[in-house]
Amino acid sequence: MSDSDAGGEKEQEAKRASRPVTAAARRERRASARPAGKATAKDADKARPAGKTSSSADGATKADGKGRATPKRDRKEKKPSLVARFTRFVREVWAELRKVIWPTRNQMVTYTTVVLVFVAFMVALVYLLDFVFRKGVFWLFG
């Protein structure tokens, strides 16, 4: 074995030893590797103010704006005239109707037939149930 091989092994062992094993050690290493201008999370929290405070007459402090009503806005939005609102409504309805996919004549006939058959079936079902219940009630109560 040569001296250069032994030196290479020692460098690898030194790298392995310097690598943090625990999560706490990794956090500490990351914190120490930060640039000097950056504050840690704990330092940043300490530097941040807790909130604006104002003193009241009795010496107690309250956060700004707490304990009083929000001031009302002075300006109101001007409502458009009745004609302008109606015109806007018609324009928007027309725009929505342009988006509709209208069925073809063949589709319309098919849909109408399906609806009429379904309605006829439901009418027959209700009539049949009514007839059966009426006969049952007359049989039971005479």
Image (cartoon, rainbow, N blue to C red):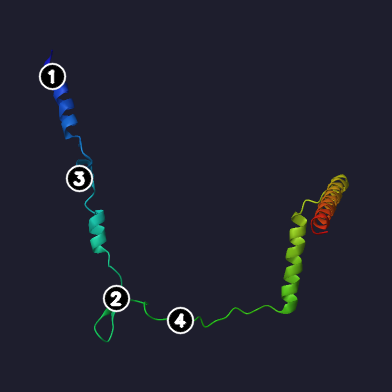
Give, as a three-letter code, the residue at label 2.
Thr
Work out which quarter of the rendered image holds the C terminus and state it: bottom right
Separation of residues labelled 4 and 2 (CA atoms): 19 Å
Please name which of the two marks, 4 or 1, marks the residue nearer to the observer.
4
**Numbered disc 3: secondary structure:** helix
Separation of residues labelled 1 and 2 (CA atoms): 66 Å
Specify which label sits upstream in the sequence, 3 or 2.
3
- The answer to whether one can see residue 38 in this image is no
Give, as a three-letter code, the residue at label 4.
Pro
Give, as a three-letter code, the residue at label 1.
Ala
Q: Position of residue 40 (x, y in %)?
A: 24, 53
**Would you place residue 74 above or below residue 135 in this image?**
below
Residue at horizontal 78 percent and vertical 51 percent from the top: 101
Q: Camera-side residue: 135 or 39? A: 135
According to the picture, the residue beneath numbered tag 3 turns out to be: 28
Give, as a three-letter code, the residue at label 3.
Glu
Residue at horizontal 75 percent and vertical 64 percent from the top: 93
According to the picture, the residue beneath numbered tag 2 turns out to be: 53
